[in-house]
Amino acid sequence: MNMTCKQIRYLPILYLAASFLLPLHPISAQQNGLPLRDFDSVLGFYHPHFLAGQAILEEAVVRRLGAVSSALQAAAANEIANLSISAAGTQYFFGRDRMFYVSESLGTYFIEPPWTTGAGNGSVGINTSYLDFRTLQGRGMSRIFDFYNADGDLAWQGDYCLTGQLTTLSMAYGVMDRLDLGLIVPLVYLDGEGKGRFARVANFPDITDFNESITDVADIFIRAKYEILEIEDLDNLFSWSAGVDVKLNNGDSDELLGTGDVGVRLRTSVGKRIGRFYPVVELAYNFAGVDAVNRMTVLDRNVPDAVITFPTGVEDDDFNAFEIRCGLPVALIAEKWTLSMEWMHSNSSFAVTNDWGVSTRIKINDQFFVQGGVRIPLDDEGLRTDFIPTIGCEYRF
């Protein structure tokens, strides 16, 4: 094995870290003759707290990787929260004591319609979305943890992959004809796999390798919607409502399941019948409630018992966003089958994103509906997938 003097200098630090800072896997102690490692998060070796507490990497490398890991941790939790609302599935249809069908259309899927369900009426929906995150701020997930030195040479090669599944249980109930209360409970499975090594060190031990997963409840949403104006003439059907989504902070932020703080999303929406079409427009401002890792602290190798604290470049308010959502559902078969085209825009300091959605909803009977769609990112800012397929069903009572 050919190594430079600088690379040889790393080896005592590597094995010291391996001996004292990385715990042995509780089940198996050996794999290919090397210790297995058990990390506490799906971010594994690249969790901000772990990066700040180990001695493998120098300060400059930790600064770079720490900035990326802090952004990824906050962005993933915020993305899951936003998708939980989009895939809630509950559509707040008119109950039997009011006009049950809206323009003979079964409504949008990723965008909540403006009308309320009516006093004493309710619905329960369950929907599942499949997640395969591909890029963060335009860089491939397998390359976001690469570090290049001052000469532009690859010094640290890091690979990372984040996939998962989001299942939302959503409920709504009309406490008054024009006031609905709702609840969204997201159940999330995430799997993180990664590794890292010095680019010019052959046979680097697998002390940084990990494959961790988590299944748990993410941040829960409590919802309310009030219909300000309603025109019930079917030939001139119109609805205008205002609502609020309150995001609790019950999710584990270390596991990317929670944003770390309470969030509030204020929204207003309008809908108007045009024949078999029922276009819907929603405007919202999302106080995301992200409690990101703003600063990190590492040991100062040049001064004994001293530390260096530096900003990660990620601020809590970066994720607060102005949102526009527009949907155009059309009744292909009146009261039976609807196809919807939907556009979702979000503008924040962290990312400006646009998603295109195509969905369908089918009536099985007056109480049971099945639904599905795909959400496709149109740009690569923020944390993005190639597409997000979602399927589900809804029961109304």
Image (tube, rainbow, N blue to C red):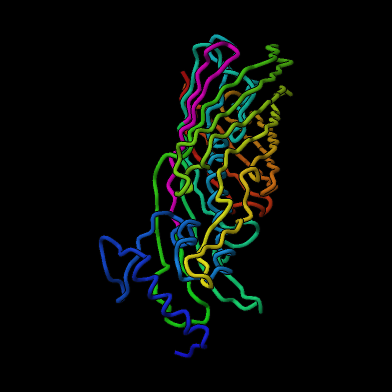
24 and 5: which one is in front?
5
Q: Does the magenta stretch include residue 8?
A: no
In this rendering, position of residue 100 left or right of residue 352: left
Q: Residue at x 62, y 75 (%)?
A: 149
Q: In this view, does 5 lie to the left or right of 318?
A: left
Front residue of 307/340: it is 307
Q: Is residue 368 above or below residue 165?
A: above
Residue at image point 70% right, 11% down: 233
Tell me the quadrant of the picture where the N terminus can be found.
Answer: bottom left
* Region of the chain picked out in magenta, as a range: 170-192
Residue 62 % position (x, y): 54, 65
Q: Main secondary structure of the magenta part?
A: strand
What residue is at 64 percent from the left and 43 percent from the top? 317
Relative to 229, residue 281 above or below: below
Residue 271, image x, y percentages: 70, 24
**x and y, in percent, of residue 243 in the image:** 62, 24
